[in-house]
Amino acid sequence: MTTVNIYLTFDGDCMQAFEFYRSVFGGEFSYIGKFSDMPTQEGQPPVPEAMKDFIMHIGLPISTETALLGSDTGGEWAPSVNKGNNFSISVDTDSKDKANVVFNALALGGIITMPLNTTFWGSYFGMLTVDGKLC
């Protein structure tokens, strides 16, 4: 099964926002990861000290099919985050093969910002922007 969920991006206040959403929707966070949890990668600059406690990823299940997802960003990750346009869509599939099909179809005419790959947190993950004419 493929699911589609909203992904919100913040500039340092993700945890505060998700505490609010949890107070509204209830439940428990399925995952909280901070930028300080990221392993150091060769060729990549270290996470600035001021961002180490920022949220790299957080999930709040809303139902069995949906979740509210989010992260903080800033600096070189996304310097132009503005509240009001700080959201994207997260697509989750039940197999790598299905992920490849969906990702490649969405990428046609778009821009791949992170190719699909197995990540340090164990997910098969990638990011892209679809063709702007389709949005």
Image (cartoon, rainbow, N blue to C red):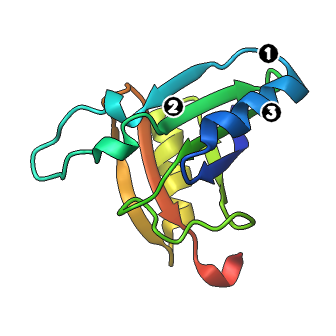
Amino acid at pointer 1: Gly
Disc 2/disc 3 C-alpha distance (Å): 30 Å
Depth check, mark 1 against mark 3: the one in front is 3
| Outermost residue toward the right in this view | 24
Q: Residue at x 58, y 31 (%)?
A: 58
Relative placement, left or right, of 72 versus 13 is left
Residue 29, x across and y down, in percent: 66, 19
Q: Mark 3 points at which residue?
A: 21
Question: How far apart are labels 1 and 2 at the CA level?
Answer: 27 Å
Q: Position of residue 107 (x, y in %)?
A: 50, 66
Residue at point 50% right, 74% down? 110
Q: Name which residue lies at 80% across and 21% down.
A: 64
Q: What's the mark number on residue 27?
A: 1
10 Å crowding of disc 1: few (<14), some (14-19), many (20+):
few
Dot 3 amino acid type: Tyr
* Label 3 neighbour load within 10 Å: few <14, some 14-19, many 20+: some
Q: Earlier in the sequence, mark 2 or mark 3?
A: 3
Label 3: element kind: helix
Of the pair 18 and 99, the residue shown nearer to us: 18
In the rendered structure, are the residues bearing label 2 and label 3 in contact, judged by CB atoms less than 8 Å apart?
Answer: no
Mark 1 and 3 residues: CB-CB less than 8 Å, in contact? no
